[in-house]
Amino acid sequence: MRKNRSNAEIEEAIRASMNMTDVPAPELNHVLKAALYQQEAVLRKQPATYQLSFWYLPMILNLITFTLLALLALIVIENSYLSYFAAGICFYADAAGILLTIAGVKRANIKEEITIRIEKRGVPA
């Protein structure tokens, strides 16, 4: 008998919850829609991809490599004229690498070629 009574109470609670007709106010609905449209507009204004350019990377690697070679030449070579000559050639290669990178940026559109594009999540298409 106790089981029937608890089932009746549960059924009453279920029926009461099914009969609820709470409807949000139209003003609240309009406010929520306006906020949603504003968020969509902000997301649409943001670019869909983030671009990370590595046009300067060859220049930096060249600069590091030949600077280290120049330091190595100054340290290892015992003849001072020969060590300065080797270091000068390395510094010349540094300058040539910088100039070639600048020329590549100006003439060959290297910035567009060495770019990684990362897509953002959550941006509507």
Image (cartoon, helix red, strand yellow):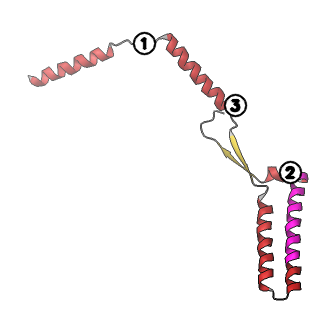
Q: How busy is the neighbourhood of tag 3: few (under 14 within 10 Å), some, or many (20 plus)?
A: few
Query: 102 or 77, which is in the foreground?
Result: 77
Give the residue pinned by disc 3.
45
Image coords of residue 53 (percent x, y): 75, 51
Eye-nearest disc, 3 or 1? 3
Image quadrant in which the N terminus is located: top left
Residue 30 lies in quadrant = top right
Q: Which residue is mark 2?
A: 109
3D distance between C-alphas at marks 3 and 2: 27 Å
Side (left or right) of 29 relative to 114 = left
Q: Residue furthest left?
A: 1
- Magenta stretch: includes residue 13: no
Seen in the image, is 11 located left or right of residue 41? left
Earlier in the chain: of badge 1 and badge 2, it is: 1
Residue at left offset 86%, top offset 62%: 98
Q: Which one is in front, 6 or 35?
A: 35
Q: In this figure, which residue is indicated by the disc labeled 1?
A: 23
**Residue 102 at x, y = what percent?**
87, 56
User: Contact, CB < 8 Å: mark 3 with mark 1?
Assistant: no
Circle 1: residue type: Val
Say whether disc 3 or disc 2 marks the residue closer to the N-terminus.
3
Secondary structure state at the residue bearing disc 2: loop
Quadrant location of the C terminus in the rendered image: top right
Q: Position of residue 54 (x, y in %)?
A: 75, 55
Residue occupying image coordinates x 77% and y 54%: 114
Q: Which numbered disc covers residue 81?
A: none
Q: Which image quarter: residue 45?
A: top right
The magenta stretch spans which residues? Answer: 87-106
Q: Nearer the viewer, residue 28 or 6?
A: 28
Q: CA distance from mark 3 to mark 1?
A: 34 Å
